[in-house]
Image: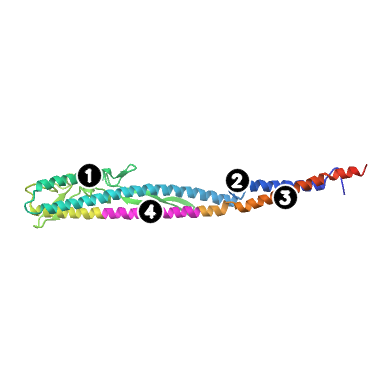
Amino acid sequence: MSSIHTNRSAMTALATLRQIDAQMETTMRRLSTGLRVNDASDNAAYWSIATTLRSDIKAKGAVVDALGLSGAMTDIASAGMSQAVDLAAEIKAKLVLASEPGVDKTKINKELDELKAQLKNVAQSSSFNGQNWLYGSPEIISMPASIKDYGGFTSVGYIEVDKGQTTLIDPGNNSNGLLTKDRAVTTAGGSAEIFYLLGSGTAGTAKQITLDANTTADELSGMLQAIDDMERDLIDANALLGVKASGIERQEAFTRTLIEVSKKALGRLVDADMAEESTRLKALQTQKQLALQALSIANSQTDMILLLFR
């Protein structure tokens, strides 16, 4: 049935054309953004998951940055501690040399004073980003290491360093510093003595590790034991820093892996298949041309009706 009031063919062709235009708009948006799910209206469930993943990725990126700073601080502290170990070994060597008969102990003491000054410089200069793990008051240093999310509860995980185990000099309390604390020893002659290297000593009877012409062989043996004890503490402290540095490196690598895995998961959820979308666009363009042709044909039906009245 033909009608001049209602052109059903044209209406059908127009509806098809509108549907094709809507599909083309969706395809063009996917091609321009590279995303299959760009907002909640595309797929509410996937959009929600993707938004959470993006937030997690940003948080993990911040953790990687923090771990980088922590790693740099650990490296600085370890380098300073390694230098302190080397200087302690030099001091021990000088004390051994001073044990030789006929050696000028006062000249060796000048070298000891220089080595002590270098130790102070090492402790004070081993700082990074406003932190110094070798100088100052002992404290627990907490460094962000991970983002924990379980049971709907999010928290930050930390790697902790006990600065009390790495402090070389605490200007406020000599007993806290590895270089300033008292060392109780028993000399080769069997005497109980207390020695210290830097600072002023804690016990009133403590003697500084220093040389003069009157320094006895028994005192030298006590100083050597004190330096040996100090050196062991320095080595242990450097080992601790090495362990922390390795832990930070492993955690940083693991966090980077988590970020990459999260990005892959995000891509699977929301990324558009560009080859598929490009093929779909070409097909829709062809369909649109056919729909326009069909609409043109449908609109020409009224002209055919007019011919019947001629």
Q: Disc 4 vs disc 1: Cβ atoms closer than 8 Å?
A: no
Disc on the earlier residue, 2 or 1: 2
Amino acid type of the residue tagged 2 in the rendering: Ser
Residue in the foreground of this view, choosing between 1 and 193: 1
Q: Which residue is mark 1?
A: 120
Disc on the earlier residue, 3 or 4: 4
Identify the disc placed on residue 249.
4
Magenta stretch in the rendered image:
236-262
Q: Disc 2 vs disc 4: Cβ atoms closer than 8 Å?
A: no
Image quadrant assignment for residue 268: bottom right
Q: CA distance from mark 2 to mark 1?
A: 61 Å
Q: Which residue is mark 2?
A: 32
Q: Residue at x 49, y 52 (%)?
A: 152
Colouring used for the render: rainbow
- Of labels 2 and 1, the one closer to you: 2
Disc on the earlier residue, 3 or 1: 1
